[in-house]
Amino acid sequence: MGILMLKTSVFTRADRHFFPLLSLFVLFVVCFLLFLSKSSYIHLPYSSFTRSILSDTSKPCTGRYIYVYELPDKFNSDIIRDCRNLLPWHHMCPFVSNMGLGPRVNYTGSVLTQTGWHFTNQWVLDFIFHNRMKQYECLTVNSSQANAIFVPYYAGLDTGRHLWNHNVTVRDSLLVELFNLLRSRPEWSAKGGRDHFILSGRTTWDFRRQGNDGDLWGGKLLTLPEVKNMTVLLIESCPWGSENEFAIPYPTNFHPSRKSQVLTWQEKVRLSTRPWLFSFAGARRPEQVHSIRDQVADQCLNSTQCKLLDCASPSRDIDCNSPITTMSLFQISNFCLEPPGDSPTRRSVFDAMLAGCIPVFFNPHSAYTQYKWYLPTNYTEYSVYIPEEDVRDGRVSIEEVLLKYSEEQIGEMREKVISLIPALIYKDPSHKIGSVRDAFDVAIDGVLERVKLRH
């Protein structure tokens, strides 16, 4: 990490012709600074570094340095090695392969593009994000130089494997040990954790347990006083009064390794023929009194303009976890219905938008109060909102609402959705795509800006 990656080409032909002595001098200065430097640059191009010296502009990493704790393996790597126990009903080991992206989709058919697709589990974001962080270009080994400090504890995976354990001591043991460690570190003492950030690939509701009753749901990460000073990234934040929580996208199945893969996919969904006005992919929730899933499914079934993908169907031909299944539906739909599931947000929102499908929301906390770093504040640019009370009480026809949109309006909204795709996906951590800013890049910008404002 302490190595500066240099390109051999530094100056143009004109530079070498007119400024040979200056070139030699600059090379000497760079080498000398590299020898003296205590900071760590990851893959910073030599030409960019040299140009910054010649033009006397700010260094590319100024204000963007991140220090990453080197925690004992028990807080991250060992959790991945224990993949068989990550979820009690699901074999998760295949999904931690390929740096957390999961198995590659080898047969894409005509539905997907040929490369960049994986079977990705939504709960593995802790691992994916950490692997992306290892590729971040402004890492530093000097914590006093850092603008922000990342704690690579896999909070979501750790808590997730113990959620059904009624022994809260076991459920909280690693978390308690982590904060005992952090409080002993000079990096924490310097600012009381105000420059620290942590991530979980689960929702806020999994970390808000009050008390030590084993029948209560969740862990207690978000109830710790120390965490109030930190910035916390989650796939769903609490929309009421939690100023330190920020929602970032659920991982989809698309993880490009080149810019061309992103552009090819955007063009594919832009040109898709969409015979269905709207569609719904999901399962009913008959046991949830306040859920509108049943009403949404019924309205879809009763409409000749809607296609339903029943994810609770016992049919072996339906696999809602397959990107081919979901993308084949979303690509032929103009609008995708996104009612709340177990919580207001759902991964389907990002799968749908990845396919260029315009999301229809029924609860403002499904997106509008959540992904403020990622989605336009004017939600009418990219989505439709229908209050869930109107659907529950039978006061509104979803079909009639959507039929009011003209082809021109639908085209404009779809184009907006397609333009958002790069920032809603997570790139392949094993590659660098410098010109494509993904969900990780947007999150880092948000963290750095928040830490800066709090100093």
Image: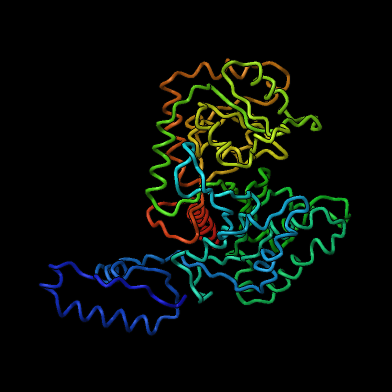
Classify 118 as above or below 175. Answer: above
The reply, left or right, for residue 43 in relation to residue 442 is: left
* Image label count: 0
| Residue 324 percent location from the top left of the image | 55, 39
| Residue 271 percent location from the top left of the image | 40, 31
The reply, left or right, for residue 44 in relation to residue 75 is: left
| Residue 232 percent location from the top left of the image | 63, 56
Classify 235 as above or below 1. Answer: above
Classify 300 as above or below 377. Answer: above
Camera-nearest residue between 395 and 76: 76
Q: Quadrant of the C terminus?
A: bottom right
Camera-nearest residue between 239 and 25: 25
Query: In terms of image quadrants, where is residue 151?
Result: bottom right
Classify 37 as above or below 255. Answer: below
The reply, left or right, for residue 317 in relation to residue 175 is: left
| Residue 170 percent location from the top left of the image | 83, 64
Residue at the (59%, 59%) spot, across then down: 97
Q: How is the image coloured?
A: rainbow
Residue at the (59%, 50%) spot, across then down: 120
Camera-nearest residue between 55 and 281: 281
